[in-house]
Image (cartoon, rainbow, N blue to C red):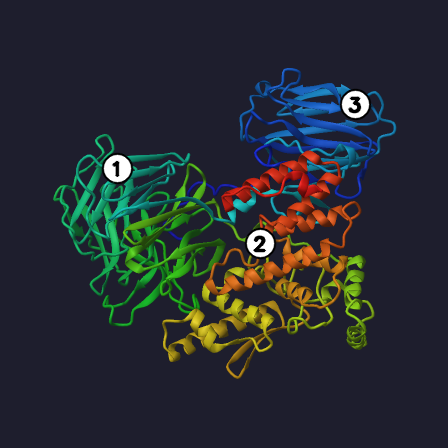
Amino acid sequence: MIQGLRGQNVTPELDYGLVFSSHEVTKDQRTSLALTPEAPFIMKDGFEIKFDLSLRRLTDAYGYVLRIIANDSLNIDLVSSPEHEDFDDLNLIINNRQTGIHFNHADIGLQAMAWTTVAIRFNLREHRISMTWAGQEKTHELATTADLSSFRFYFGANEFGKFNTSDVPPMIIRNVELVRNVGETIRWDLRKHGIGEVYDNTLTLAATTRNPTWLADRHIRWVHARDFQLEKYPSVAFNSISGALYAIDKNNVYIYNADGKIDRRKIQHGKPIYSDANQLLYVGAGNTLVNYDLFSGRLSRFDFERNAWENTDTTYNLPNYWHNNKFYNPFDRSVYTFGGYGHFTYKNKFMRYDSAARKWMEVQTTGAIPPRYLGALGLTAKKDKALIFGGYGSESGKQELFPQSFYDLYSFDLRKHDIKKIWEFKSGHSDEDIVFSNSLVINEEDSCFYVLSFPKNRHDSFITLRRYSLNKPEWQALADTIPFQFHDEHSFCDLFLSQATRQLVAVTSHKEKDHYRINTYAINYPPVSTQDVFQEVEKTSTAAVYMILAIVLIAGSAATFVWIRKKRKQPEVPSVQEERSVIPSVAGSATPINFPETEKAASAIHLFGGFQVLDKDGNDITGKFSMTVKELFLLILLHSAKTEHGISTTTLQEQLWPDKDDMSARNNRNVNLKKLRGLLEEVGDVTIENNNAYLRLVISDNVVCDYHVVSRILASGNAVDNTMIEALLKHVKRGNLLPDIQSAWLDNFKSDISNRIIDMLLEYSEKLDVNRDDRILLEIADTIFNYDSINQEALVIKCSVLNKKGKYSLAKTWYDHFAKEYKSLYAESYPKTFDEVIS
């Protein structure tokens, strides 16, 4: 920890657990967790199952918390049944009969969203079952348990034979433990997860999930919270204690509260400062909202009782302190500012507003910070020091004399006004000029701070959340990105910590014609990287090997010859790890398909469901790819998969550096290619060939790229069979191609691959039997819906299969949902009736 920075409250623990979708969604969208997806557990003497339970609401909460199926013939159910006269709020039911084990919410003082522990113990020798909830225990004598030995466990919905159910309470589950009498404990914390599955803490036993929502994912993904517009002279501020966002324009003050309510205050008297560079600051001392402009020397406070500003001067002043930083100093009870830009000059003065003299005064400091703007500032927990990080400026303050990005950290003592430099990136921090949000958030307990970053020289770009060390120049990219349109003086972004909701809140602003568009985003605190949430499990199986060999064999006699020739140079039975993707040949050619059937823990490039890169050791290095390097990589990768020669350097320049001359663009390209090649060396044997002004990506056999695997399957020219479809589904059901990246050039790739995936799946579905192949048909339909939510062929498949399985009401529910979405999109009713769809 940096000397002089005191610790604050301990960082909140990562939220974790599985959220179950309940009656608020259609039946086939409800959540299930199966601890025994294949074989049951054999436990002849008894066992205990224990878990943490939280109900999201206490009304409209009917459903199966847990269904235990013994010997595939006897059901033991823990059922939530509030608002029912014949049952208590939580009941243990055995073989469809009530028992003496039941609880009411009031008996244990249960509140919504509160965690309680449930433990169910089976003593098969003594013919007794007992249950403890929130410390209260109840027991029930079993008639006989002599024959009970195998047990299946399902939380929420399940589709197991006659015991299937879609009644799910609105619950959250975590810390599931299964304790056998012999002392063995199997534990699923539900902190980390995979896709459609979650392993126990030893990464040995996989439970399966359907329609999961993971609390931990809220720490890696931004959620778009609000979108609104303001008129002239907008600015925003934040109350970290209550989580309220304040936004103003020339006529109104808006208060966006943490509970989602909006309080609009029409200004009755006075006006905010008429300047496009005005700033807004919430001061907790006195619950004060302060609006100011340094150049005009004005500062105005808002009276919440009168809905009035102190300022009455509506003279417009040209901006001269764009993007200055601000804070309230409790030691002299004054508003302070630092830096800014205007009239070709970068600023580095600390200014203080003297309320008695009603003017801004320069603060005399010990030490100095080079002039800059677009940097970030935040206060320590004790509010005795301010940290100032980064920005864009010049040592002289003059725009004409070598302006540059700064990646350095300073502290400013609020009592003594001493300035100290803490650290600086000497080189290698970023391949392009990046700047930062107006504020940063300090986490002293973890010796780090959080800040938003974005390229200074790009208009359509993305904001990235970064975590920097307080002690040394180290950083890590976190979460996904936020779209951002940056136009210097007409754009703004900021970052706040809401103590009320335990979230980081990002606010962006940009000008649209005669108004300003404001967007807010939230992510649970503390934010983490994807590797902190997703389970990476190495899977190797003989079945997978045979599946790969089968795919190779179907390529035909010519392909077989190629395979045999390669096989002479390899061990007779290759391991799963040795089967890797290669760049596909020109579309339409019939070539051998060589791809992995399981997730890889090392040397992998994932594009479906989100961009992710793993190095040779299985470490997630996605955060090392800056925006420009990532886009450069994807342009080369996707064009190399599409055409044999790759992408021309001219096309690269048009996409990445359209505003630069040839010399400058070439220099930028060379610098970024050097960085990209260094990152690819960490991944494995991945090279970039340069041939006659064309760049082409070559991936060797020891690196997996899901896009290449999928492209090879789609372009194989072979007859489609179940093995190929299973392999295709494994990758494409993860999600759309690069959903977290929005670039115009990428649209055609997304559209093309989506159409080809849908076409292949539909083509194969026509060969299947609805009675025999129901599982694969449902998976095909669900995958197609991920790419096209109103695909009519997928609707027919889904409803027909469900109807054939005797799930008429479920099929009808899905049809109704589809018809509603169809009408919402096309403003007309879906032309086919339900009977026509399932006929």
Front residue of 371 and 698: 698
In the depicted structure, whether residue 355 falls above or below residue 635? above
Looking at numbered disc 3 in the image, what kind of residue is underneath it?
Answer: Arg
Residue visible at 37% across and 74% down in the picture: 660
Asked if disc 3 and disc 1 are in contact, CB closer than 8 Å, the reply is no
Distance, label 2 to label 1, CA atoms, is 41 Å
Asked if disc 3 and disc 2 are in contact, CB closer than 8 Å, the reply is no
Residue visible at 25% across and 68% down in the picture: 399
Front residue of 329 and 456: 456
Q: Where's residue 700, x and y in %?
A: 66, 72
Distance, label 3 to label 1, CA atoms, is 63 Å
Q: Which residue is mark 1?
A: 288
Residue visible at 43% across and 45% down in the picture: 504
In the depicted structure, whether residue 686 falls above or below residue 472? below
Q: Earlier in the sequence, mark 2 or mark 1?
A: 1
Q: Earlier in the sequence, mark 3 or mark 1?
A: 3
Q: Where's residue 339, x and y in %?
A: 26, 57
Residue 531: which disc? 2
Q: Secondary structure at mark 3?
A: strand
Q: Secondary structure at mark 2?
A: helix
